[in-house]
Image (cartoon, rainbow, N blue to C red):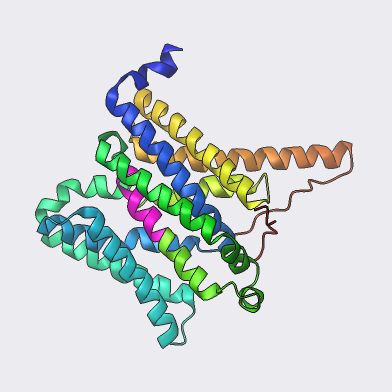
Amino acid sequence: MDFLLDPFTVLFVRRALVAGLIVSVLCAMVGTWVVLRGMAFMSEAVSHGMLPGVAIAYSTGVNLFLGAALSAGLMVLGVAWVSRSSSLAEDSSIGLLFVGMLALGVVIVSRARSFAVDLTSFLFGDVLSATWSDLWWLAGAAVLTLVVSVIAYRPFVGLILDRRIAHTMGLWPRIAHVVLLGLVVLAVVASFRIVGTLLVFGLLIAPSATALLLRRSIPATIVLATGFGWSATVVGLLVSWHADTAAGATIAGSAVLQFFALLLVRKAVTAVRVRFVGVADDVPDVHHRPGSVMVTDDK
């Protein structure tokens, strides 16, 4: 038991645990919609698109979260503008802006030598340095996300199933899409200090994707994704403490490993059922594209 409890007797590890638990709730609420809507690439682009804003904020002494939010917001607006102003598909626009923002960020970093010291922390996170102000910021972001998710629940469901039907039903799919993008920006900006810009994508996607292997109800998926995020946080911190590895990367890696472990278990169970019972698994495979997952409105 000492092996499991000793790390959490240290104050900064306890703060890291609380931060990871809150981030898990936040990412579960947003990540479930992202996976169902097929917006994983956009989430990754937003996480990388923050680099210019953070670099400029660091160099000028401005709040890093403000710089990250402005940069991520510009990334989203840029994708929307390019998609509407050209014949490019949205994924092509995302790829174009993704590379452009990342390149701009690297150029700014190369000019701001003082930022190079903190670049590793920015890219890979530093959950062990989480402060009480970070925890309050994360809690506020989680509460805001919960409120918006409850209010916009039905429009989000309509957006996932069919935008045309949602429009006919008066669910404002275009506004719902913008609101969902706003939640993605909020989740990424709030979480990047904990797991870094390169790894926040994994924590946003992996727990929700894992949960979708088990259930199709959206509320149940969010609850399960939160649980998987919590377990990844605890396991990641324990492994990081005893193996002396980067905490943020270990947490994100644990979340991804959960997905593949559960996927292998599902495949094994299906094979056994087919072999001895003659009945295949009744839970459909999850494909990361819009409209491919049947969901139920359990609200």
Relative image position of residue 208 (x, y in whole percent): 55, 48
Relative image position of residue 125 (x, y in whole percent): 30, 44
**Position of 171 relative to 280 (above/below):** below
Taking 148 as reference, is 119 left or right? Answer: left
**Position of 129 relative to 147 (above/below):** above
Kindly identify the residue that appears in the image at 46 percent across and 30 percent down: 235
Kindly identify the residue that appears in the image at 35 percent across and 75 percent down: 78
**Position of 177 relative to 143 (above/below):** below
Kindly identify the residue that appears in the image at 88 percent across and 36 percent down: 276
Q: How many marks?
A: 0
In the image, 203 versus 92, the foreground residue is 203
Kindly identify the residue that appears in the image at 82 percent across and 46 percent down: 280
Residue at the top extreme, as displayed: 2
Residue 112 in which image quadrant: bottom left
Taking 154 as reference, is 4 left or right? Answer: left
In the image, 270 versus 284, the foreground residue is 284
> Is residue 190 located in the magenta-colored stretch of the structure?
yes
Relative image position of residue 204 (x, y in whole percent): 46, 50
> Is residue 161 located in the magenta-colored stretch of the structure?
no
Residue 54 in which image quadrant: bottom left
Relative image position of residue 159 (x, y in whole percent): 59, 68
Provide the major secondary structure of the magenta segment. Answer: helix
Residue 244 in view of the camera: no
Magenta range: 184-194
